[in-house]
Amino acid sequence: MDVGAGDGRAVVRRAAQSPHTLVIGIDASHPPLISTSRRASRPASKGGLPNALFVLASAEAPPFELIGAAEVVTVTFPWGSLLRGVLGLDRAVVEGLAALVAPGGSLQALFSVEERDRTAVGPAGVPGAEACMRDAFVTAGMRLVESREASQADVEASNSSWARRLRVGRERRAWLALFRKDGRTGPIG
């Protein structure tokens, strides 16, 4: 699942690369997804991707049907409340993202936040981000297993149009955070 799918191009790319894997894009704003979802819903003989699905929903309130369904959830260069959630500053987003991840699954966030973004993420959004993320996600059942500055290769591999617009890697730095959900499904004994 790609949360904050934006224009949906990353979902289409992943679906085309892995035709036997269901790839779901979730975004709270439908206008950017309209043309991409229409193209993906065409018959396969006309270039459609039957394994690509787009859902209009917010990270704070993911559809019940998707709870615990994803082995991998990605969030790539989020903004607004989704960015605040990735940074551990919006509890509802943290819980929504964690809820999507299946036991044993992962959440990978690739994001860029700088001092000048304080109006978007709030005064606690830059210093101490790693500790804030770790603390917020652990209470949602996930542990931070990797946190580092993203390499240029990480940014390029995301193929994110938003990263290009932000000039990530040229004018802005980016970070990568990887979280895992415990694989146990029953009570802890």
Image: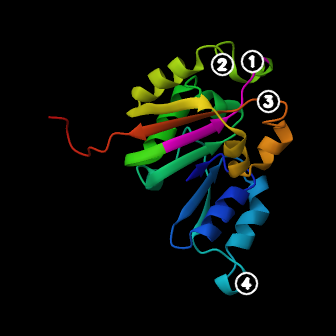
Residue at 67%, 35% in the rendered image:
111
**Colour basis:** rainbow
Q: Are marks 1 and 3 in contact (CB under 8 Å)?
A: no
Q: Which is closer to the viewer, label 1 or label 3?
A: 3
Label 3 residue SS: loop
Q: Earlier in the sequence, mark 2 or mark 1?
A: 1
- Residue bearing the label numbered 3: 172
Using the rendered view, name the quadrant where residue 37 is placed.
Answer: bottom right
Q: Quadrant of residue 186?
A: top left
Q: Amino acid at mark 2?
A: Gly
Between the C-alphas of marks 2 and 3, the distance is 16 Å
Q: Which residue is rendered at x = 19% and y = 35% of the image?
A: 188
Q: Which residues are magenta?
A: 107-115
Dot placed on the residue nearer the N-terminal end, 2 or 4: 4
Q: Which residue does the numbered mark 4 point to in the structure image?
A: 46
Give the mark nearer the N terminus: 1 vs 3: 1
